């Protein structure tokens, strides 16, 4: 299908509980277009994967949500996670040479430290994905994180403060680029690039599932978005929340 490029429709807010919630409400009211983006300096109840909260110091980081209308088959739903992961990681590499990795399914890491988080929430009609809210949080200029958080930021990596607006614009442009690839049905290319950035692929690591701690090697992610890990008892596939990385 012909891709309609993202519109630079930006809504800047001083404070909001959740940019994803705000975007979803605008979507429900029919007040969005392909590219409507909610940005805030302070998010009081940001949400991440696995029901976690997203914590960031006000004014130092990027927290935003982009509304898109992919109109695609539900069987390709995980490619939206791939697209956003690739867009954010590529944008970060403009400011930090990397490597920047994707920790399955779509957390962005430098080494073993998280620098960005993604939450994709889709709306369906039958077997079609009709709209999506792409929530993105990027640690930009924050230097202090809680003792229990294994996190980093561009500031900590480069020693420089970056313009939040510039980092956002770079990310928005990368998102537009990768969405274009998705709408052109470049599934093999997107999967290849995603796997090239997949944290731990081909490496022996420790994990934990419902049976306990085990060693295994990530061999990839299947078309449904399940993580494939080679164990001593064969290859097992894991749903979100079913396996934990230990590092």
Image (spheres, rainbow, N blue to C red):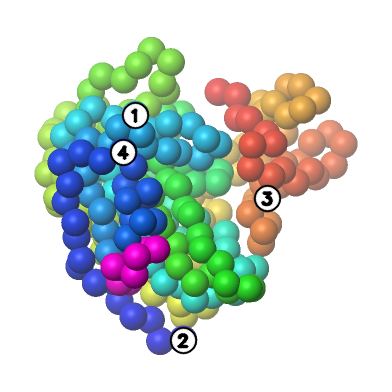
- Whole-number angstrom distance, CA of label 4 to CA of label 1: 12 Å
> How many C-alpha atoms fall within 10 Å of the one at disc 4: few (<14), some, or many (≥20)?
some
Closer to the chain start, of discs 4 and 3, is: 4
Nearest to viewer (mark 4 / mark 3): 4
- Whole-number angstrom distance, CA of label 2 to CA of label 1: 38 Å
- The one of 105 and 45 positioned closer to us in this rendering: 45
Percent position of residue 19, x then y: 32, 47
Task: State left or right for residue 61 relative to residue 72.
Answer: left
Nearest to viewer (mark 3 / mark 1): 1
Q: Quadrant of residue 97?
A: top left
Nearest to viewer (mark 2 / mark 4): 4
Vertical relation: 63 (above or below) 247: below
- Residue 1 badge: 2
Percent position of residue 241, x then y: 64, 37
Q: Please name the residue shown 55% across and 54% down the image.
A: 195
Q: Which residues are magenta?
A: 27-35
* Residue at the extreme right: 233
Classify mark 1: helix, strand or loop: loop
Percent position of residue 219, x then y: 68, 47
- The one of 219 and 148 positioned closer to us in this rendering: 148
Residue at label 1?
A: 55
Residue at label 3?
A: 226
- Whole-number angstrom distance, CA of label 3 to CA of label 1: 27 Å
Q: Quadrant of residue 59?
A: top left
- Whole-number angstrom distance, CA of label 2 to CA of label 4: 36 Å
Vertical relation: 240 (above or below) 188: above
Residue at label 4?
A: 17
């Amino acid at each position: 299908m012909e891709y309609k490029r993202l519109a630079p429709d930006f809504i800047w807010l001083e404070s909001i509980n959740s940019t994803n919630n705000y975007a979803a409400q605008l979507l429900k009211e029919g007040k969005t277009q392909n590219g409507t983006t909610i940005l805030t300096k302070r998010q009081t109840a940001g949400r991440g994967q696995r029901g976690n909260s997203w914590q960031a110091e006000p004014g130092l980081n990027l927290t935003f949500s982009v509304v898109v209308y992919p109109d695609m088959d539900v069987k390709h739903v995980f490619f939206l996670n791939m697209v956003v992961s690739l867009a954010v990681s590529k944008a970060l590499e403009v400011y930090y040479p990397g490597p920047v990795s994707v920790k399955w399914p779509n957390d962005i890491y430098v080494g073993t430290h998280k620098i960005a988080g993604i939450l994709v929430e889709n709306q369906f009609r039958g077997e079609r994905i009709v709209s999506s809210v792409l929530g993105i949080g990027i640690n930009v200029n924050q230097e202090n994180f809680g003792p229990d958080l294994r996190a980093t930021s561009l500031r900590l990596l480069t020693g420089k403060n970056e313009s939040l607006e510039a980092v956002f614009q770079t990310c928005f442009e990368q998102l537009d680029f990768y969405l274009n690839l998705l709408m052109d049905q470049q599934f093999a290319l997107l999967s290849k690039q995603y796997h090239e950035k997949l944290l731990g692929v081909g490496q022996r690591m420790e994990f934990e599932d419902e049976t306990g701690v085990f060693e295994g090697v990530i061999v990839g992610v299947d078309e449904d978005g399940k993580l494939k890990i080679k164990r001593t008892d064969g290859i097992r596939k894991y749903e979100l929340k079913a396996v934990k990385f230990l590092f």
